[in-house]
Image (cartoon, grey):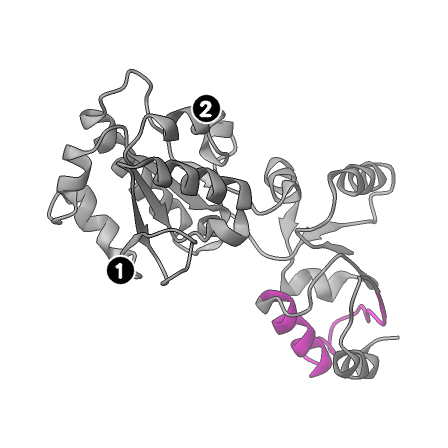
Amino acid sequence: MMLLGTNTSLEVLNLLNALTRKYSFFKLRRVDSQSVNVDLEQNYLLDLNLNNKIAISDTCWLIGINPRYEGSKLNLRLRSRYLQGNFKIIQIGSLLNLTFPNVNITSNTKILKSLVEGNNLFCQEFVNSLNPILISNAQIFKRKDSFGFANLLNFLNKHINLFSQSDDKNQLNILHPSLGSVGFLNCTSLKSVQNKDLKNAAGVYFVNNSFTNSNVKKLLNLKLLNFFHDHVHENKILITQNNSLDNKLITELKKGFN
């Protein structure tokens, strides 16, 4: 079994995908699950005309996103637009220093429900704004309620279109911190790793993987505690290809793997 991290390049992903087609005993797995409708690219990408829309907009909503670190180019574009004047940034999430003023209304996602229902005071911002923009990040697809959360944002986007003063329809913009994460979304055959994968695998090959991920850490701890010792397969081989490794973690892994 090969466990791929989200930082794996598209070239490596394509090569490994070709390898699994030639040799069926190789299994590719991702670190954690993501639930996203990949039928349309607009469901999980930034709008190609986003820069033009920012230029004619006066309000931008950032939902659970830190563009300063996740998308520096986008953050510079928002800062440039703010310095031009008549531009407001409203944020739903943790308090952040984006290098330009912004209004943080809450870190609770329940406010989205009140915004969709029209029972929130900030609904006036949509009515009085000119072509408001919604931007979130790919982390929403890792939530257990990802489909419901995405539908809530899409409903909010539809209400925005009712008051938009532009002929172009707005869409929910999803920012990815890396190009590889987009490739992972397009690779629909890449499933997330589960307990049964670790049970059935004769060995595990980690590629650009962070052992600090909660899902991987949980599975490794179960293995080190001999949770899978009654299973017919004994996966004694662990190979990792990474830039940095924790010496303490390596010592623990040697107890259950070679």
Q: Which residue is mark 2?
A: 49
Q: Earlier in the sequence, mark 2 or mark 1?
A: 2
Mark 2 vs mark 1, CA separation in Å: 29 Å
Q: Secondary structure at mark 1?
A: strand
Query: Quick check: is 235 in the magenta stretch?
Result: yes
Instruction: Count all numbered tags in the image, as a single digit.
Output: 2
Give the quarter of the figure containing the N terminus.
Answer: bottom right
Left or right of 218 on screen, residue 161 = left
Q: Quadrant of residue 230?
A: bottom right
Q: Can I make out residue 36 in this image?
A: no
Highlighted magenta segment, given as a residue range: 215-239
Residue 17 x/y as whole percent = 78, 39
Residue at left offset 44%, top offset 50%: 140
Residue 243 x/y as whole percent = 80, 62
Circle number at residue 106: 1
Residue at left offset 80%, top offset 68%: 233
Residue at left offset 25%, top offset 26%: 161
Give the quarter of the figure containing the C terminus.
Answer: bottom right
Residue 152 x/y as whole percent = 29, 43
Label 2 amino acid?
A: Asn
Q: Secondary structure at mark 2?
A: loop
Q: Quadrant of residue 229?
A: bottom right
Q: Can I make out residue 115 in this image?
A: yes
Marks 2 and 1 close (CB-CB < 8 Å): no
Q: Quadrant of residue 151?
A: top left
Viewer-side residue, 68 vs 181: 68
Label 1 amino acid?
A: Thr
Residue with the most extreme top position: 167
Residue 225 x/y as whole percent = 69, 83
